Amino acid sequence: MNVPRSAETRRPRKRTAAPAAGPPPSRELQELGCLYEVTRALVAAADLKAALREVMEILAARMGMSRGTVTIVNPRTGALEIEVAHGLSAEARRRGRYRIGEGITGQVVATGKPLVVPRISEEPRFLNRTRSRGDLHRKDISFLCVPIQAGRETIGALSVDRLFDGTVSFEEDLRLLTIISGLVAQTVSRLQAINAEREQLLSENLTLRRALEEKYGLDNLVGKSSRMVEVFEMIHRVAGSTATVLLRGESGTGKSMAARAIHFNSPRKDRPFVTVSCSALPETLIESELFGHERGAFTGATARKPGRFEQAEGGTIFLDEIGELPHNVQVKLLHVIQEREFQRLGGARPIRCDVRIVAATNKNLEEAVAAGQFREDLYYRLNVFPIYLPPLRERRTDILLLAEHFLAQFARENEKAIHRISSPAIDLLVQYHWPGNVRELQNCMERAVLVCDEDVIRARHLPPTLQTAASAPGSGRRAPSLADAVAAFEKELIEEALKESRGNQTRAAALLDTSLRIINYKIHKYGIDPSRFKNPA
């Protein structure tokens, strides 16, 4: 049995009406929302103009303030120039220039006090140089302008337009604009400090780079022996190329300095120079250090890390003690040299690289290849342009040059007035066999400068290893006795006095506060020839 629908059931349903719009937000809520957005835009700002443009758009959208304009004092010309203007063309911004004190904006900057023009059509001081408002006499526009102050200095002004309707509270508008101008001033100061720090770092970096270029210029490398002249010539020839260089020689011969000289005299001198000590890194970490790793590649790899090859992109990587490289890493290095690409540890994507390789070793790589400790194919890839740095004992004519160079360097660093090295000290330096090469000589001169309290480095200021004949390799002689040490010291004093007096024995005796007779006796005893001091070099 069909039951007829009731009238209520058949009556079409009424649509639920949309809730009536609530009252517009209060002035306080509008200002809070506006300040929140302005603060967020300025706090995250890295580009001042972009941030100011966003602030002007917020004022237009939130508060109905059109043509928001920030005018800044140009420190070079002293004129007021528009930095950012909402809704103005580039031509209008160029026209908007004022002298301080000129017009409403110029007066605000000059006095540091805000101004309100209720109707710009009735204000003769309003210049309208941008000509963006058309015929002022046909429009009821209010103009508000507040200063932008950094400390006690007014650096510009913030201005906006308002449609005049009699309901706008200029006092509330000025209060809001003053708060915003303060935020703008803080942002300007912050970005100026960041830019100043960046410029200082760039300047320091440029100064350091120039100093490095000068320090490692070929003209500044110390050495005049025929062996070193050959080395400098080879560095000069290979520096401008992209060839792989293998520096060979004993420890302390200056391989690291030669590598830097190659880099800083090459077209890559403005790019990175990255040093890797293959012997100082654990075998488990060297692959990660060279090629980098992806997150999760191994236990403890919590983030992606770029390797040294990525850090050296476009520049030079110096692989010191290449003979200590583990066998598995040798394979990857060979691939990098051949293909100019590598993969991070745990990565699947090959990374192209443009890096020049300079390697160094104090090992006999030929013996290492024969013993199976070093890959033969890698050896031939590295040995494109070998440069052998001779030990110091094979370039004795450079010992005095290097000693005087280090003396000047350490005397300057330690603020000591030490001008020369005595003849007996020079003899000791030249006769020593220098197992530690240039590095040992450098350490020796640094110690001598530190212990010296005169203006001359004497034999007693040098390390004990240089002052005993037993220090020579294969020598079985005993250390000098007290009488020998006293005689050596006495001879040194007489030679220094004769050098200062240009061979004049009478004057030398006076310098040593002794008699001419004693000086003559000592000269004959020690076999000193006074004539060789008459024209000292």
Image (tube, rainbow, N blue to C red):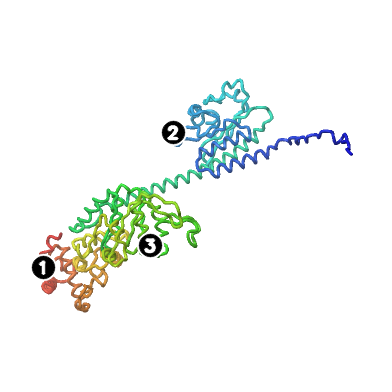
Q: Which mark is residue 529?
A: 1
Q: Which mark is residue 341?
A: none
As shown in the figure, which amino acid type bears the numbered disc 3?
Answer: Asn
Residue nearer the viewer, 387 or 327 = 327
| Residue 328 badge | 3
The numbered mark, 1 or 2, whose residue comes first in the sequence reads 2
State whether residue 74 is above or below residue 138.
below
In the image, taking residue 371 as reference, residue 105 lies left or right, namely right
Pinpoint residue 127: horizontal percent, then vertical percent.
54, 25
Q: Which image quarter: residue 343?
A: bottom left
- Residue contact between numbered discs 3 and 2, judged by CB atoms under 8 Å: no
Q: Is residue 454 above or below residue 189?
A: below
How far apart are labels 3 and 2 at the CA level? 65 Å
Of the 4 image quadrants, the one containing the C terminus is bottom left
Q: CA distance from mark 1 to mark 2?
A: 75 Å
Name the residue beneath numbered marker 2: 77
Q: In the image, residue 208 lies at what x, y percent?
A: 35, 51
Q: Residue at x 14, y 60 (%)?
A: 536
Q: Is residue 452 visible?
A: no
Q: Is disc 1 placed on a helix, strand or loop?
A: loop
| Front position among marks 3 and 2 | 3
Q: Position of residue 258 (x, y in %)?
A: 28, 56
Residue type marked 1: Asp
Can you give x and y, in whole percent of width and height, for residue 149 in the image? 54, 40
